[in-house]
Image (cartoon, rainbow, N blue to C red):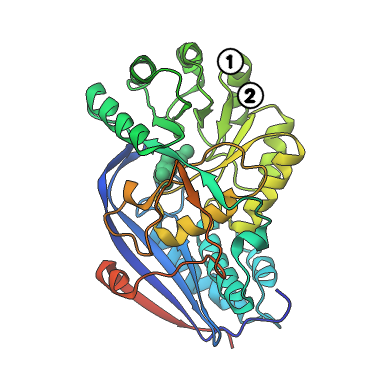
Amino acid sequence: MSRGLEVDEIELRRVQMPLVSPFRTSFGVTTVREALLVRVRTPEADGWGECVADAEPRYSSEHLAGAEQAISDFLVPALSGLAEVTVAAALEAWSVFDGHLMAKAALEAALLDADLRARGRSLGEELGAVRTEVDCGVSVGIMDSIPELLDQVGGYLSAGYRRIKLKIQPGWDVEPVRAVREKYGDIPLQVDANTAYRRFDTSHLARLDDFDLLLIEQPLPERDLLGHQHLAGALRTPICLDESITSAADAAQAIALGVCSVVNIKAGRVGGLLEAKRIHDVCQAHGVPVWCGGMLESGVGRAANLALAALPGFTLPGDTSASERYYTRDLTTPFVMVDGRLSVPSGPGIGVSPDPDVLTEHTTHVVHLEGPR
Ligand code: OSB
Ligand code: MG
């Protein structure tokens, strides 16, 4: 972005989207996804961003109401001090505010989308995409019983998903993994604990080594890098970090310390698409494979995730699933999986826009903020 954006208005919109089935993780269950959409209005185009914070601070310390407040009270006012509103200048101005990465990512995405649409350039091109479609994996929640889990996994395999990820927690780990391996054989399979284990669980987690998993994602708490380092030495299964990695500096440190050998990148968790690309670059330079995570996004966030997942270092299938895995009606034209892959949008910006009627139907409240003066 060279010249500045003329931002007339910023719209913050809360939406509620019922999931096709409840999604249970070690930190809670979601039946209706609550999201915050950011629309940046400029004379040339509207730019869209989706905030990945949850209604409650369980996955991370951020939550939706807090993100909304951070945007309206700090991030938008900070734009007023800029000579020119550019994405780079905005990120620089926001760097004085500690944390609030999900809030920053949502507004960054909307500014970037507005700018790219005005310039007729796709997000994929801007980030350095090298492919037009990406391999899809699917994240399978904790279920009430093994037969229900096997049914759900079977459905996703029939649909064509190229990799299955099982959510695990103490009491739901070795047995479900064994059952899926026994029934479905040598499929690409991995697990995600969302910080549910502690260092004293090391010998229990080592039992997962029998199942040739692609990786185990975030077994220990976010801050416990040393614990993950010990675990990496004790397990054959590769350690992948999600919650622990919030910047390129985090990724560089984790790699240098031998804490993980794979990284799950979520732009929404790391303060934006540009930081996500930097994490990708650091990992690629060290030969560490990455994949694109998800936070049950609507089509708005999904479109941006697909552009990111098209970068060369994203060599593992991500949690970039089809719209119908989450929602009966997505906010955008649904993303449909063909042969286990989703197409990377090629239109300007994120390449899709919310349908006004679906948007209105799901909206619970809207706030309009004046653009920077
Ligand atoms: O840890 O990857 C995670 C969903 C919400 C919060 C955290 C996570 C997830 C998922 C689902 O695993 C990914 C998706 O399909 O969007
Ligand atoms: Mg995860």
Q: Secondary structure at mark 1?
A: loop
Q: Does residue 64 appear to the left or right of 227 in the view shown?
A: left
Q: Secondary structure at mark 2?
A: helix
Q: Quadrant of the C terminus?
A: bottom right
78 in relation to 351, above or below: below
Which residue is rendered at x = 54% and y = 75% of the image?
A: 76
Q: Which residue is mark 1?
A: 236
Position of residue 88 measured from the top left corner of the image (x, y, whole percent):
69, 68
Q: Check contact, mark 2 vs mark 1: CB within 8 A.
A: no
Q: Judge whether residue 270 can be spotted in this image.
A: no
**Image quadrant where residue 158 sits:** top left
Position of residue 258 measured from the top left corner of the image (x, y, whole percent):
69, 26
Which residue is rendered at x = 41% and y = 81% of the image?
A: 368
372 in relation to 20, above or below: below
Residue 212 or residue 252, whichever sits in front: 212
63 in relation to 185, above or below: below
Mark 1 neighbour density, 10 Å: few (under 14) some (14–19) many (20 or more): some
User: What amino acid is labelled 2 in the image?
Assistant: Gln
Residue 358 or residue 253, whichever sits in front: 358
Q: Judge whether residue 32 can be spotted in this image.
A: yes
**Image quadrant where residue 167 sits:** top left
Q: Quadrant of the N terminus?
A: bottom right
Which of the two discs, 2 and 1, sits closer to the camera? 1
How many numbered tags mark residues here?
Answer: 2
Residue farthest to the right, as pictured: 285
Disc number at residue 229?
2
Mark 2 neighbour density, 10 Å: few (under 14) some (14–19) many (20 or more): some
